Image (spheres, coloured by chain):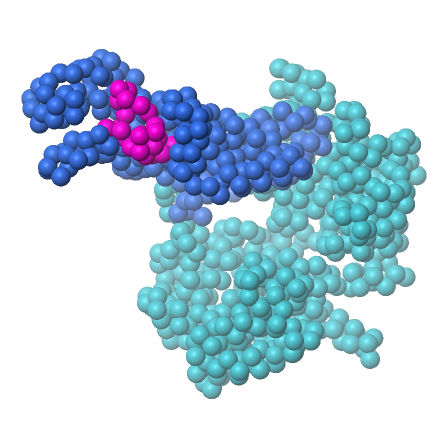
Amino acid sequence: MSTQHTDILNMRTKRTKSQDAWRLLKSAPVSAKFGMFVIAFYFFCAVFANFIAPFGEAEIVGKAYAPPSLGHWFGLDQIGRDTLSRVIFGARNTIFIALATVLISFFIGGVLGIYAAVTRGWMDQIVSRIVDILMSIPVLIFALMLLAMAGKSVWNLIFILALLDSTRVFRLARNTALSVAVQDFVEAARLRGEGMLWVVFREIIPNILPTLIAEFGLRFSFVFLTISALSFLGVGIQPPTADWGSMVAESKTLITFGRPQPLIPAAAIALLTVAVNFVVDWFLQKTSGLRDEQ
Amino acid sequence: MSNDTKRVKGSSLVQIRGLKIEGYSDEKWHPIIKGIDLDLKRGEVLGLIGESGAGKSTLGLATMGYTKPGCRISAGTVMFDGVDLVNAPQEKLRQMWGSKISYVAQSAAASFNPAHRLMDQVVESATNHGVMDRDKAEADAKDLFKRLQLPNPDTIGSRYPHQVSGGQLQRAMTAMAMSCRPDLIVFDEPTTALDVTTQVEVLASMRRIVEEFDTAAVYITHDLAVVAQMAHRIMVLRYGNLVEQSDTRSMLKQPTQDYTKSLWAVRSLEKPEEKSSDVVLSISNVDASYSGVMKVLDNVTVRLPRGKTVAVVGESGSGKSTLARAITGLLPPSKGRIEFNGKPLPAKLKDRDRDTLRRIQMIYQSADTALNPRQRVRDIIGRPLEFYLGLTGQAKEKKIVALLDNIELGEDFIDRYPNEMSGGQKQRISIARALAAEPEIIICDEVTSALDQIVQEEILKLLMKLQKDTNVSYLFITHDIATVRAISDEIVVMYKGKVVQQGLKSEVLNPPYPAYTELLLSSVPQMDPDWLTGLLKKRAGVKA
């Protein structure tokens, strides 16, 4: 390489990590910036729901089905609760339940997947086949069945969805870890006499982390949509807890009268999903080989 | 259509003037080809040589009017048979590619679709371009298979790509490129992935068929001896510039530029052999297999003298890498014993103690996969220091810097990631990682195969220097005879899992040879443009 090239490299190493991160953010395309802004906004609403929402989550403040007005921007629902406030509380409930679900599913799927990739053998075979079987059943139907058996509660919802979702995380973690585990540097570490924990945490995980982070975003979107769908069907988050899926279900007949109420929680669901996907797309493009340059 | 067109040998076919090509990375356009003129006559074979990054592949593809994704032609013209390829519409180019200009890639295995039979793929371009109907194309393909000396030319077309060998596949690929009788074929390192004994056959049939049809060809390679056999004229490229060009014979006799001379000089490196009876590692009657059925190592006996270099040579599949796996404990032998410093070495990796592991280190072929891309040089070299020698903090830091000095890289490399270094620099880091353990044996598995010739020589010189300084023994696995000549004291020749011959370099490289050693040695291309012709004559004479 020419000397010019080495100069560039030296400059690059001198920058600090936060400067690097800032440059990276600035170079993000508009779609990703928009996505990040939306996600930040949703999380802000979710965390500070108690302070932002003008009325309480289950507080009845007026006549049922009252149309939008200055005091109630989005109108009132079927028993006279403020729709805007319920959308804000819905953000808190739906997002945190989805987040908890994805964290648990990554814990189960990630640990099993990486363990299977490193050890291989019969353990890998058994877990992989179980995962194949679970994945062959449609998630929504399976979740409906399990929820009907276990009973409707938030924790049941979280655990059942986490378990079903962990199958997909398992596959990804196993496959990406496997492709790293066969590389020479992992063999070099084993020849050096390193233990399994070193191999996993120092050699393998740093190399599969970007893919897992991107998948985390996508799985969050999917889980979030599944929860909304289950709530819409009446087996997800139960009233009076505010939730976007059940809000759409409760007000869905209003659409025939030309009223916008059911569209508001539906738009909230759509916007967050799109935003997460924008950010994940950009992140994947940055970290994987999927760039326009070779 | 092109079948009937008269071709006048010697008339101009390709004319490139002032060609500049740029590649896009890091949000900038970087020059790859910096203004090159190229002329190619009908029936002429032009060799493009240079190190990786010289732009030879980019220039070769540009003669087809093609640039890789992320590259663009920023200036200059490419005229092919009167057609301006730079400004030609995509539709016109697609008509020409495959029928008038074709391409043979380095990896035939990656270029064939594994799901279709060879014949379907070979005749595809001829039938798609409407040159011939299917029956005629198949008959023609069989004729081409015969001319390319493929075995069973009438039936080989019904096989799938995985059912033929690498050399056969490369010839089938040439048949595919020839099917429309193009005016120009671009060969991009077509024999680089092949064994030397296979390479000879492929080179011979490629050269013959190009001559028979008076096809012009661009032959891209980094191997000077190969290009000497194939090309009428040679262009030497470096950093996207033309260094010099002339016809093959005068280029080999009197290169005018220093850079070209340095390329030629690489092959002269040679170390005098030394004898030693102090054996550090002795492998006796070892068998090993992956499945338990087929023996990959068959009764192998090898001795490694202390402070010396034993080169293990053989083609792919000869078991030389398996020998390394047996020594390191990754593949415990099913029979036989391995003794290290006179004591038996535990067969399995996990039965060996840390100090034994420390004494046997390994360097891999590809530094790209042997270094963790997420670790800095500090961690890569520092880990064995910490793990085996218990060094931490300042002492460790000092030792890392000393090692970086040893491998002739400065201490400013300490914070780099592998992707911030060149191939040669990465291989040096691999060497430093092995050295950090202060080993008695280093197993080098094809450590120079992925490098450019000039870099190869630097790495070999470094390895020799380190051997002098530390008295380490090398088990040097390679298929490259020039490398063997350069650094070994003793040579082990392997074939199909058996040791054909072990002895001092002077014994193995000089007659009398066992039959396989002779075949192997005679197949290594020489820097003499008549070498291939002579060899083919000699072999034909022996057969007759």
Residue B44 seen in this snapshot: no
Tell which residue pokes out farthest to the front in this image: A149
Where residue B48 appears, x then y in whole percent?
55, 62
Q: Is residue B430 above or below residue B291?
A: above
Colour chosen for chain B: cyan
Q: Say if the magenta span includes residue A225.
A: yes
| B311 on left or right of A160 | right
Residue drawn at x 58%, y 78% is B141
Location of residue B89 with respect to A14 vertically, above or below: below
Based on the displayed image, in which of its 4 quarters is residue A180 positioned?
A: top right
Residue that protrudes farthest toward the left in the picture: A70
Q: Nearer the viewer, residue A223 or B323?
A: A223
Q: Is residue A105 above or below residue B461?
A: above
Residue at 68%, 26% in the rendered image: A194
- Quadrant of res B347: top right
Magenta segment, which residues? A223-247
Chain appearing in blue on the rendered image = A
Q: Is residue A117 left or right of residue B495?
A: left
Along the line of sight, the residue nearer the viewer: A251 or B112? A251
Q: Residue A148 location in percent, x, y?
A: 41, 30
Image-quadrant location for residue B194: bottom right
Q: Is residue A156 magenta?
A: no
Count of numbered marks: 0
Q: Is residue B436 left or right of residue A153?
A: right
Q: Position of residue B543 (x, y in %)?
A: 82, 76
Q: Residue at x 39, y 37 (%)?
A: A140
Residue A255 location, x and y as percent? 15, 37
Image quadrant occupied by the C terminus of chain B: bottom right
In the shown orientation, is residue B364 left or right of residue A133?
right
Q: Which image quarter is the N terminus of chain B in?
A: bottom left
